[in-house]
Amino acid sequence: MTKEEFEVTAYDVKGTVDYDKLVHEFGVKHLDVPILNRLKAYTGELHHTLRRQHFFAHTNFDQILNALERKEKIYMYTGRAPSGPIHIGHIFVWQFTKWLQDKFGCELIFQIPDEEKFFFKDNVTLEDTAKWTHENMLDIVALGFDLKKTKFLIDTRDAGVMYKTACQIAKKTTASTVRALFGLKNEDNVGKYFYTMMQSVPAFLPTVIEGKPTLCLIPCAVDQDVHFRLTRDVAERLGYPKPSTILSKFLPSLSAESKMSASADIGIWTTDDAKEVERKIKKYAFSGGRDTIEEHRKLGGNPDIDVSFQWLSMMFEPDDHKLASIRDDYKAGKLLSGELKQILIGKINAFLAEHQKKREQARPIVEKLLKQPF
Ligand code: TRP
């Protein structure tokens, strides 16, 4: 793969992603100024991930704004396939999801597809995914979603709620469509094929629950949109409204790979302690600084390729003025790479200290939620 080549599928991200190209290839739309202004008119402010174009694309988001302006009830839906710990990249998407829920005051369906990684990974058992369901829900609850308006949909537990809709979708979907969209092969187990039905179902559940056409907004990273392309394609034929998506770029890995993935790269887990965070950032965070202090002072650093700066921009420094001054100082050579890393380390550790406390407090709540079917 050359530098210009990249690939984004629901199950793999390779190369350096060109997001403009991706918008074109995926047939999604840019979150442009007019639509952001419409959103701002409704919410009163724009989240930093919108101001900075980290959430950068959408499908049918206009219809969500129409519904909100008409005071119609909408739902949101997102999800997490449990098979390992939660890393900072997941938190990035869910913090924004929580912001939207707070602004819209809407219901949220949080799907935990505990069969997905069982089908897609060789060594993952259903016992493993049950354990990670529990662990991951601690992180999700710790983020402070409004639990009166948030319902967890755990696939193997709540299959009864999902199955009819899954069957409707399955009847309108051919194996060759799934194969083409998800890059599956004849040799792949049929669970992988059928799982794609299960990720579509929650997009239609709002209509099933309400008993009338009800719109659904799905905040997620852009690689997941392919699932909802399938969902959009079958919606009309089944008499459901098309779901809307609002799509983010990937939080880069410490080594500046396009996407931080749990398996392939060094990440920061929500359970890392302060020393571990410091060690990882110092050792692995890809730097846009110069080789020597003298050179750096003279020529300055490059924030655009610097992972510590990217992480501040995407997650840890919501204040535009503060971010701009960090950027300027870094470019001018006033701020050294080690100092920039130290700013990030401080921010991550402050976040994690709070998060880990809330994660512990979430234990009895998650015990209860696990016993409450959808
Ligand atoms: N497929 C997602 C994963 O690999 C999990 C998921 C299920 C999801 N439903 C979703 C993600 C809706 C975003 C939106 O973790």
Image (cartoon, grey):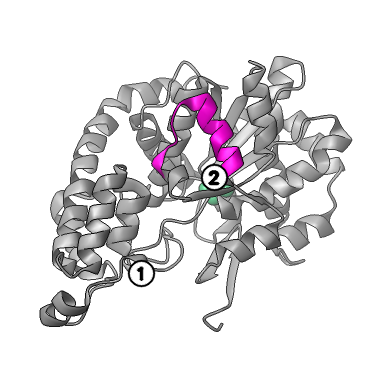
Does the rendering let one see residue 317? no
Q: Which x, y percent locates residue 120?
A: 59, 57
Q: Is residue 43 magenta?
A: yes
**Residue 73 percent across, percent down from the top left:** 64, 18
C-alpha span from label 2 to label 1: 24 Å
**Can you tell which of label 2 and label 1 is closer to the viewer?**
1
Q: Residue at x 58, y 46 (%)?
A: 31
Q: Which mark is residue 287?
A: none
The mark that comes first in sequence, 2 or 1, is 2
Amino acid under disc 1: Ile
The range drawn in magenta is 33-48
Residue at the (80%, 37%) spot, across then down: 235
Q: Which residue is denoted by mark 2 in the rendering?
A: 220
In which quadrant of the rendered image does the C terminus lie?
top right
Q: Is residue 55 above or below residue 188?
A: above
Tell me if mark 1 has few (under 14), some (14-19) or many (20+) residues whose alpha carbon lies within 10 angstroms of its own.
some
| Residue topped by disc 1 | 305
Ligand 1 within 8 Å of disc 2? The answer is yes
Asked if residue 138 can be seen in this view, the reply is yes
| Relative to 88, 40 lies left or right | right
- Verify whether residue 275 appears in magenta: no
Foreground residue, 336 or 129? 336
